[in-house]
Amino acid sequence: MTTTAKPSPRDRLLDAAAELIYREGVGTGIDALCRAAGVSKRSMYQLFGSKDEVLAAALARQEPRLAALLMPPPGEPAAPRERILYVFRRMEEAAASPGYRGCPFLSAQVELKDPGHAASSVAARGKRGITDFFRAEAERAGVAEPGLLARRLAVVYDGASTRAGIGSEVLDGLAVSTAALLLDAAGLTEQEGPAEDTAGGAKDGGEAA
Amino acid sequence: MTTTAKPSPRDRLLDAAAELIYREGVGTGIDALCRAAGVSKRSMYQLFGSKDEVLAAALARQEPRLAALLMPPPGEPAAPRERILYVFRRMEEAAASPGYRGCPFLSAQVELKDPGHAASSVAARGKRGITDFFRAEAERAGVAEPGLLARRLAVVYDGASTRAGIGSEVLDGLAVSTAALLLDAAGLTEQEGPAEDTAGGAKDGGEAA
Protein backbone atom coordinates (compact mmCIF):
# COMPACT_ATOMS: atom_id res chain seq x y z
CA MET A 1 0.00 0.00 0.00
CA THR A 2 1.36 3.42 -0.93
CA THR A 3 0.20 6.85 0.14
CA THR A 4 -0.84 7.65 -3.42
CA ALA A 5 -3.16 4.63 -3.62
CA LYS A 6 -6.58 5.27 -5.10
CA PRO A 7 -9.20 5.50 -2.36
CA SER A 8 -10.81 2.16 -1.62
CA PRO A 9 -14.43 1.53 -2.68
CA ARG A 10 -15.33 1.82 1.00
CA ASP A 11 -13.76 5.26 1.35
CA ARG A 12 -15.20 6.44 -1.96
CA LEU A 13 -18.64 5.32 -0.87
CA LEU A 14 -18.41 7.02 2.52
CA ASP A 15 -17.06 10.28 1.12
CA ALA A 16 -19.73 10.37 -1.58
CA ALA A 17 -22.40 9.54 1.00
CA ALA A 18 -21.23 12.28 3.35
CA GLU A 19 -21.33 14.85 0.57
CA LEU A 20 -24.64 13.78 -0.95
CA ILE A 21 -26.41 13.42 2.38
CA TYR A 22 -25.21 16.83 3.50
CA ARG A 23 -26.44 18.39 0.27
CA GLU A 24 -29.64 16.45 -0.27
CA GLY A 25 -30.55 14.79 2.99
CA VAL A 26 -30.61 11.35 4.55
CA GLY A 27 -33.34 10.34 2.10
CA THR A 28 -30.72 10.11 -0.68
CA GLY A 29 -31.20 6.75 -2.38
CA ILE A 30 -28.71 3.91 -2.62
CA ASP A 31 -28.57 4.19 -6.40
CA ALA A 32 -27.52 7.82 -6.18
CA LEU A 33 -24.91 7.01 -3.53
CA CYS A 34 -23.38 4.19 -5.57
CA ARG A 35 -23.43 6.29 -8.74
CA ALA A 36 -21.69 9.21 -7.03
CA ALA A 37 -19.07 6.88 -5.54
CA GLY A 38 -18.53 4.88 -8.72
CA VAL A 39 -19.24 1.69 -6.77
CA SER A 40 -21.67 -1.03 -7.78
CA LYS A 41 -24.63 -1.84 -5.56
CA ARG A 42 -23.27 -5.36 -5.28
CA SER A 43 -19.97 -4.00 -3.92
CA MET A 44 -21.84 -1.71 -1.55
CA TYR A 45 -23.77 -4.61 -0.07
CA GLN A 46 -20.55 -6.56 0.31
CA LEU A 47 -19.21 -3.71 2.44
CA PHE A 48 -22.31 -2.63 4.34
CA GLY A 49 -25.45 -4.39 5.47
CA SER A 50 -27.78 -1.49 4.70
CA LYS A 51 -28.01 2.17 3.75
CA ASP A 52 -28.38 2.96 7.46
CA GLU A 53 -24.94 1.47 8.06
CA VAL A 54 -23.49 3.57 5.25
CA LEU A 55 -25.07 6.64 6.82
CA ALA A 56 -23.64 5.91 10.25
CA ALA A 57 -20.17 5.12 8.88
CA ALA A 58 -20.18 8.24 6.68
CA LEU A 59 -20.94 10.44 9.68
CA ALA A 60 -18.35 8.68 11.84
CA ARG A 61 -15.74 9.28 9.13
CA GLN A 62 -16.47 13.02 9.28
CA GLU A 63 -15.94 13.31 13.02
CA PRO A 64 -12.14 13.81 13.04
CA ARG A 65 -12.32 16.19 10.07
CA LEU A 66 -14.91 18.37 11.75
CA ALA A 67 -12.95 18.34 14.98
CA ALA A 68 -9.84 19.46 13.09
CA LEU A 69 -11.85 22.21 11.41
CA LEU A 70 -13.50 23.56 14.56
CA MET A 71 -11.27 22.86 17.52
CA PRO A 72 -8.22 24.92 18.46
CA PRO A 73 -4.83 23.20 18.56
CA PRO A 74 -3.60 22.38 22.08
CA GLY A 75 -2.43 25.48 23.92
CA GLU A 76 -3.11 27.89 21.08
CA PRO A 77 -4.81 30.08 22.04
CA ALA A 78 -4.18 29.32 25.68
CA ALA A 79 -7.00 31.12 27.52
CA PRO A 80 -10.22 29.10 27.96
CA ARG A 81 -12.37 32.02 26.82
CA GLU A 82 -10.39 32.40 23.61
CA ARG A 83 -10.38 28.65 23.01
CA ILE A 84 -14.16 28.57 23.27
CA LEU A 85 -14.62 31.58 21.01
CA TYR A 86 -12.23 29.99 18.50
CA VAL A 87 -14.85 27.30 17.84
CA PHE A 88 -17.52 29.90 17.17
CA ARG A 89 -15.20 31.84 14.87
CA ARG A 90 -14.38 28.72 12.88
CA MET A 91 -18.06 27.87 12.59
CA GLU A 92 -18.86 31.37 11.35
CA GLU A 93 -16.08 31.04 8.75
CA ALA A 94 -17.48 27.71 7.58
CA ALA A 95 -21.00 29.16 7.49
CA ALA A 96 -19.83 31.82 5.03
CA SER A 97 -19.13 29.24 2.29
CA PRO A 98 -21.86 28.89 -0.35
CA GLY A 99 -22.58 25.20 0.21
CA TYR A 100 -22.99 25.54 3.97
CA ARG A 101 -26.08 23.78 5.31
CA GLY A 102 -25.40 23.78 9.03
CA CYS A 103 -23.85 21.08 11.20
CA PRO A 104 -23.96 17.73 9.37
CA PHE A 105 -24.50 15.90 12.65
CA LEU A 106 -27.42 18.05 13.72
CA SER A 107 -29.00 17.92 10.26
CA ALA A 108 -28.83 14.12 10.23
CA GLN A 109 -30.48 13.97 13.64
CA VAL A 110 -33.25 16.38 12.62
CA GLU A 111 -33.87 14.41 9.44
CA LEU A 112 -33.76 10.93 10.95
CA LYS A 113 -36.17 11.89 13.76
CA ASP A 114 -35.05 8.87 15.71
CA PRO A 115 -32.41 9.15 18.45
CA GLY A 116 -32.16 5.34 18.36
CA HIS A 117 -31.00 5.23 14.73
CA ALA A 118 -27.36 4.13 14.42
CA ALA A 119 -26.49 7.29 12.49
CA SER A 120 -28.23 9.47 15.09
CA SER A 121 -26.07 7.94 17.80
CA VAL A 122 -22.92 8.66 15.81
CA ALA A 123 -24.11 12.22 15.21
CA ALA A 124 -24.99 12.73 18.89
CA ARG A 125 -21.52 11.55 19.87
CA GLY A 126 -19.97 14.00 17.40
CA LYS A 127 -21.95 16.86 18.87
CA ARG A 128 -21.21 15.84 22.44
CA GLY A 129 -17.55 16.31 21.57
CA ILE A 130 -18.14 20.04 21.15
CA THR A 131 -20.19 20.42 24.34
CA ASP A 132 -17.57 18.42 26.26
CA PHE A 133 -14.87 20.74 24.96
CA PHE A 134 -16.83 23.81 26.11
CA ARG A 135 -17.32 22.23 29.51
CA ALA A 136 -13.68 21.23 29.93
CA GLU A 137 -12.53 24.75 29.09
CA ALA A 138 -15.11 26.27 31.44
CA GLU A 139 -13.93 23.93 34.20
CA ARG A 140 -10.33 24.86 33.54
CA ALA A 141 -11.33 28.52 33.90
CA GLY A 142 -12.96 27.79 37.25
CA VAL A 143 -16.47 28.81 36.20
CA ALA A 144 -19.10 28.09 38.88
CA GLU A 145 -21.40 26.00 36.66
CA PRO A 146 -19.30 24.73 33.75
CA GLY A 147 -21.92 22.21 32.59
CA LEU A 148 -24.60 24.86 32.40
CA LEU A 149 -22.35 27.25 30.50
CA ALA A 150 -21.46 24.45 28.07
CA ARG A 151 -25.15 23.72 27.47
CA ARG A 152 -25.86 27.39 26.80
CA LEU A 153 -22.94 27.58 24.38
CA ALA A 154 -24.12 24.43 22.58
CA VAL A 155 -27.56 26.02 22.18
CA VAL A 156 -26.01 29.13 20.61
CA TYR A 157 -23.71 27.05 18.42
CA ASP A 158 -26.57 24.92 17.10
CA GLY A 159 -29.03 27.77 16.74
CA ALA A 160 -26.60 29.98 14.85
CA SER A 161 -25.22 27.24 12.60
CA THR A 162 -28.69 25.92 11.79
CA ARG A 163 -30.11 29.36 11.03
CA ALA A 164 -27.13 30.05 8.77
CA GLY A 165 -27.54 26.65 7.12
CA ILE A 166 -31.18 27.26 6.17
CA GLY A 167 -30.40 30.75 4.90
CA SER A 168 -32.24 32.62 7.67
CA GLU A 169 -29.11 34.30 8.96
CA VAL A 170 -25.85 35.62 7.62
CA LEU A 171 -23.46 35.32 10.54
CA ASP A 172 -21.52 38.55 10.91
CA GLY A 173 -20.05 37.82 14.31
CA LEU A 174 -23.50 37.03 15.74
CA ALA A 175 -22.55 33.61 17.12
CA VAL A 176 -19.17 34.78 18.44
CA SER A 177 -20.58 37.86 20.13
CA THR A 178 -23.55 35.97 21.61
CA ALA A 179 -21.22 33.32 22.99
CA ALA A 180 -19.02 36.12 24.38
CA LEU A 181 -22.00 37.59 26.26
CA LEU A 182 -22.71 34.21 27.84
CA LEU A 183 -19.05 33.85 28.81
CA ASP A 184 -19.19 37.34 30.35
CA ALA A 185 -22.32 36.41 32.29
CA ALA A 186 -20.58 33.29 33.62
CA GLY A 187 -17.66 35.40 34.82
CA LEU A 188 -15.34 34.14 32.12
CA THR A 189 -14.46 37.64 31.02
CA GLU A 190 -11.66 38.99 28.92
CA GLN A 191 -8.50 39.37 30.93
CA GLU A 192 -6.12 41.31 28.76
CA GLY A 193 -7.96 44.16 27.15
CA PRO A 194 -9.88 44.06 23.92
CA ALA A 195 -8.81 41.18 21.72
CA GLU A 196 -12.05 40.08 20.03
CA ASP A 197 -12.19 41.55 16.59
CA THR A 198 -15.37 39.78 15.65
CA ALA A 199 -17.25 39.97 18.94
CA GLY A 200 -19.61 42.87 18.91
CA GLY A 201 -19.40 43.04 15.15
CA ALA A 202 -22.90 41.65 14.62
CA LYS A 203 -25.27 44.11 13.09
CA ASP A 204 -28.65 45.28 14.21
CA GLY A 205 -30.31 44.42 10.95
CA GLY A 206 -32.89 41.78 11.80
CA GLU A 207 -32.96 38.70 9.64
CA ALA A 208 -30.98 38.52 6.47
CA ALA A 209 -33.32 36.37 4.42
CA MET B 1 -72.29 25.00 6.67
CA THR B 2 -72.50 24.24 10.40
CA THR B 3 -69.77 24.35 13.00
CA THR B 4 -70.03 20.57 13.49
CA ALA B 5 -69.41 19.87 9.80
CA LYS B 6 -66.95 17.09 9.07
CA PRO B 7 -63.58 18.54 8.04
CA SER B 8 -63.27 18.92 4.26
CA PRO B 9 -60.94 16.60 2.34
CA ARG B 10 -58.62 19.59 1.98
CA ASP B 11 -58.43 20.17 5.74
CA ARG B 12 -58.09 16.47 6.46
CA LEU B 13 -55.24 16.24 4.00
CA LEU B 14 -53.42 19.25 5.42
CA ASP B 15 -53.83 18.16 9.03
CA ALA B 16 -52.64 14.64 8.24
CA ALA B 17 -49.73 16.06 6.23
CA ALA B 18 -48.70 18.38 9.06
CA GLU B 19 -48.69 15.54 11.56
CA LEU B 20 -46.98 12.96 9.37
CA ILE B 21 -44.33 15.36 8.10
CA TYR B 22 -43.55 16.51 11.63
CA ARG B 23 -43.19 12.92 12.79
CA GLU B 24 -41.50 11.37 9.77
CA GLY B 25 -40.11 14.17 7.67
CA VAL B 26 -40.79 15.92 4.38
CA GLY B 27 -39.89 12.72 2.53
CA THR B 28 -43.25 11.22 3.56
CA GLY B 29 -44.85 9.81 0.40
CA ILE B 30 -48.13 10.85 -1.20
CA ASP B 31 -49.63 7.40 -0.63
CA ALA B 32 -48.99 7.64 3.11
CA LEU B 33 -50.42 11.18 3.23
CA CYS B 34 -53.60 10.19 1.39
CA ARG B 35 -54.03 7.06 3.51
CA ALA B 36 -53.64 9.00 6.76
CA ALA B 37 -56.12 11.63 5.57
CA GLY B 38 -58.62 9.15 4.15
CA VAL B 39 -58.50 10.97 0.84
CA SER B 40 -57.96 9.38 -2.56
CA LYS B 41 -54.94 10.34 -4.63
CA ARG B 42 -57.33 11.49 -7.33
CA SER B 43 -58.98 13.88 -4.85
CA MET B 44 -55.60 15.07 -3.67
CA TYR B 45 -54.53 15.97 -7.18
CA GLN B 46 -57.84 17.77 -7.71
CA LEU B 47 -56.99 19.94 -4.71
CA PHE B 48 -53.22 20.36 -5.09
CA GLY B 49 -50.86 20.35 -8.04
CA SER B 50 -48.10 18.44 -6.25
CA LYS B 51 -46.86 17.14 -2.94
CA ASP B 52 -44.77 20.28 -2.61
CA GLU B 53 -47.98 22.33 -2.66
CA VAL B 54 -49.47 20.12 0.04
CA LEU B 55 -46.33 20.64 2.11
CA ALA B 56 -46.45 24.41 1.77
CA ALA B 57 -50.18 24.58 2.53
CA ALA B 58 -49.83 22.25 5.53
CA LEU B 59 -47.14 24.48 7.04
CA ALA B 60 -49.13 27.64 6.31
CA ARG B 61 -52.15 26.12 8.07
CA GLN B 62 -50.02 25.59 11.21
CA GLU B 63 -48.86 29.19 11.42
CA PRO B 64 -51.83 30.65 13.37
CA ARG B 65 -51.91 27.64 15.69
CA LEU B 66 -48.25 27.93 16.54
CA ALA B 67 -48.61 31.66 17.05
CA ALA B 68 -51.52 31.02 19.45
CA LEU B 69 -49.43 28.44 21.29
CA LEU B 70 -46.29 30.52 21.65
CA MET B 71 -47.23 34.18 21.69
CA PRO B 72 -48.58 36.02 24.73
CA PRO B 73 -52.04 37.61 24.48
CA PRO B 74 -52.00 41.39 23.97
CA GLY B 75 -51.03 43.21 27.15
CA GLU B 76 -50.66 40.11 29.30
CA PRO B 77 -48.01 40.09 30.55
CA ALA B 78 -47.38 43.76 29.86
CA ALA B 79 -43.61 44.17 30.26
CA PRO B 80 -41.53 43.52 27.11
CA ARG B 81 -39.06 41.33 29.00
CA GLU B 82 -41.83 39.13 30.37
CA ARG B 83 -43.54 38.97 26.98
CA ILE B 84 -40.33 37.74 25.39
CA LEU B 85 -39.67 35.18 28.12
CA TYR B 86 -43.28 33.99 27.79
CA VAL B 87 -42.41 32.63 24.32
CA PHE B 88 -39.44 30.70 25.71
CA ARG B 89 -41.54 29.31 28.56
CA ARG B 90 -44.21 28.13 26.16
CA MET B 91 -41.60 26.50 23.93
CA GLU B 92 -40.07 24.71 26.92
CA GLU B 93 -43.53 23.44 27.89
CA ALA B 94 -44.13 22.17 24.36
CA ALA B 95 -40.68 20.55 24.31
CA ALA B 96 -41.59 18.49 27.37
CA SER B 97 -44.25 16.53 25.47
CA PRO B 98 -43.16 13.08 24.25
CA GLY B 99 -43.78 13.68 20.54
CA TYR B 100 -41.81 16.93 20.45
CA ARG B 101 -39.41 17.12 17.52
CA GLY B 102 -38.49 20.79 17.54
CA CYS B 103 -39.98 23.65 15.54
CA PRO B 104 -41.91 22.28 12.54
CA PHE B 105 -40.87 25.25 10.43
CA LEU B 106 -37.18 24.88 11.16
CA SER B 107 -37.29 21.10 10.65
CA ALA B 108 -38.93 21.53 7.25
CA GLN B 109 -36.26 24.02 6.22
CA VAL B 110 -33.42 21.77 7.40
CA GLU B 111 -34.94 18.81 5.56
CA LEU B 112 -35.80 20.58 2.31
CA LYS B 113 -32.30 22.12 2.04
CA ASP B 114 -33.63 24.65 -0.42
CA PRO B 115 -34.63 28.14 0.70
CA GLY B 116 -36.35 28.54 -2.68
CA HIS B 117 -38.81 25.69 -2.08
CA ALA B 118 -42.39 26.95 -1.63
CA ALA B 119 -42.65 25.18 1.75
CA SER B 120 -39.31 26.67 2.89
CA SER B 121 -40.64 30.15 2.15
CA VAL B 122 -43.76 29.49 4.20
CA ALA B 123 -41.62 28.12 7.02
CA ALA B 124 -39.23 31.09 6.89
CA ARG B 125 -42.19 33.46 7.13
CA GLY B 126 -43.49 31.56 10.15
CA LYS B 127 -40.15 31.85 11.89
CA ARG B 128 -39.76 35.49 10.99
CA GLY B 129 -42.96 36.08 12.94
CA ILE B 130 -41.18 35.10 16.16
CA THR B 131 -38.07 37.18 15.46
CA ASP B 132 -40.25 40.16 14.54
CA PHE B 133 -42.10 39.77 17.82
CA PHE B 134 -38.83 39.77 19.79
CA ARG B 135 -37.70 42.83 17.90
CA ALA B 136 -40.95 44.73 18.40
CA GLU B 137 -40.87 44.08 22.15
CA ALA B 138 -37.20 45.07 22.35
CA GLU B 139 -38.00 48.29 20.48
CA ARG B 140 -40.89 49.00 22.82
CA ALA B 141 -38.49 48.56 25.73
CA GLY B 142 -36.09 51.08 24.20
CA VAL B 143 -33.19 48.65 23.82
CA ALA B 144 -30.23 50.14 21.94
CA GLU B 145 -29.99 47.42 19.26
CA PRO B 146 -33.40 45.71 19.13
CA GLY B 147 -32.66 43.88 15.87
CA LEU B 148 -29.46 42.39 17.23
CA LEU B 149 -31.16 41.29 20.45
CA ALA B 150 -33.95 39.70 18.40
CA ARG B 151 -31.41 37.78 16.31
CA ARG B 152 -29.65 36.52 19.45
CA LEU B 153 -32.97 35.43 20.93
CA ALA B 154 -33.92 33.64 17.71
CA VAL B 155 -30.60 31.78 17.83
CA VAL B 156 -31.30 30.62 21.39
CA TYR B 157 -34.89 29.73 20.54
CA ASP B 158 -33.86 27.61 17.56
CA GLY B 159 -30.85 26.04 19.22
CA ALA B 160 -32.76 25.04 22.34
CA SER B 161 -35.87 23.79 20.53
CA THR B 162 -33.83 21.84 18.00
CA ARG B 163 -31.62 20.24 20.64
CA ALA B 164 -34.71 19.25 22.62
CA GLY B 165 -36.36 17.93 19.46
CA ILE B 166 -33.48 15.58 18.63
CA GLY B 167 -33.26 14.36 22.22
CA SER B 168 -29.90 15.99 23.02
CA GLU B 169 -31.34 18.22 25.72
CA VAL B 170 -34.07 18.15 28.30
CA LEU B 171 -35.01 21.78 28.76
CA ASP B 172 -35.22 22.56 32.46
CA GLY B 173 -35.38 26.30 32.15
CA LEU B 174 -32.26 26.37 29.96
CA ALA B 175 -33.83 28.33 27.09
CA VAL B 176 -35.65 30.73 29.42
CA SER B 177 -32.62 31.43 31.57
CA THR B 178 -30.29 31.82 28.57
CA ALA B 179 -32.72 34.26 26.96
CA ALA B 180 -32.90 36.11 30.30
CA LEU B 181 -29.11 36.50 30.34
CA LEU B 182 -29.21 38.02 26.86
CA LEU B 183 -32.01 40.37 27.91
CA ASP B 184 -29.92 41.37 30.95
CA ALA B 185 -26.92 42.01 28.72
CA ALA B 186 -29.05 44.23 26.47
CA GLY B 187 -30.17 46.24 29.48
CA LEU B 188 -33.67 44.82 29.41
CA THR B 189 -33.50 43.81 33.04
CA GLU B 190 -36.14 42.85 35.53
CA GLN B 191 -37.83 45.89 36.98
CA GLU B 192 -40.05 44.67 39.76
CA GLY B 193 -38.19 42.13 41.82
CA PRO B 194 -37.87 38.40 41.19
CA ALA B 195 -40.66 37.12 39.00
CA GLU B 196 -38.97 34.44 36.90
CA ASP B 197 -39.69 31.07 38.39
CA THR B 198 -38.06 29.14 35.60
CA ALA B 199 -35.14 31.41 34.86
CA GLY B 200 -32.03 30.17 36.57
CA GLY B 201 -33.62 26.77 37.03
CA ALA B 202 -31.43 25.11 34.46
CA LYS B 203 -29.10 22.54 35.90
CA ASP B 204 -25.40 22.13 35.56
CA GLY B 205 -25.65 18.59 34.28
CA GLY B 206 -24.15 18.61 30.83
CA GLU B 207 -26.15 16.92 28.12
CA ALA B 208 -29.16 14.83 28.93
CA ALA B 209 -28.80 12.19 26.27
Image: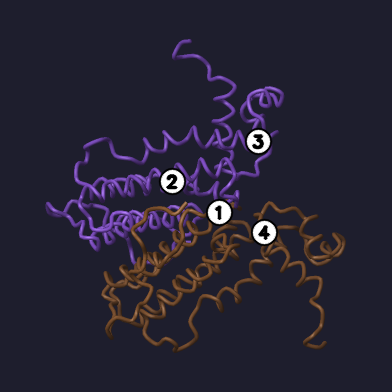
Chain colours: A brown, B purple
Q: Looking at the image, do the residues carrying marks 3 and 1 touch, with CB atoms under 8 Å apart?
A: no
Of circles 4 and 2, the one toward us is: 2
Task: Tell me the residue that label 4 is attached to.
Answer: A21
Q: For residue A139, what is the image quadrant?
A: bottom left
Q: Where is residue B96 in the image (x, y as percent from the top left)?
A: 41, 48
Q: What label sits on residue A147 in the rendered view? A: none
Q: Earlier in the sequence, mark 3 or mark 2?
A: 3
Helix, strand or loop at mark 4: helix
Q: Do labels 4 and 2 share a chain?
A: no
Mark 4 belongs to chain? A
Q: Nearer the viewer, mark 4 or mark 1?
A: 4
Q: Residue A63, image x and y in percent? A: 60, 72
Residues under labels 2 and 1: Cα distance?
17 Å
User: Disc 1 marks which residue?
Assistant: A110
Q: Badge 2 is on which residue?
A: B127
Which chain is indicated by disc 3?
A: B
Q: Which amino acid does label 2 sit on?
A: Lys
Q: Which residue corresponds to the image point at 53% horizontal and 54% vertical from the top-left? A: A166
Secondary-structure class at tag 2: helix
Q: Which residue is drawn at 38% across and 73% down?
A: A198
Residue picked out by circle 3? B51
Q: Is mark 1 on a helix, strand or loop?
A: helix
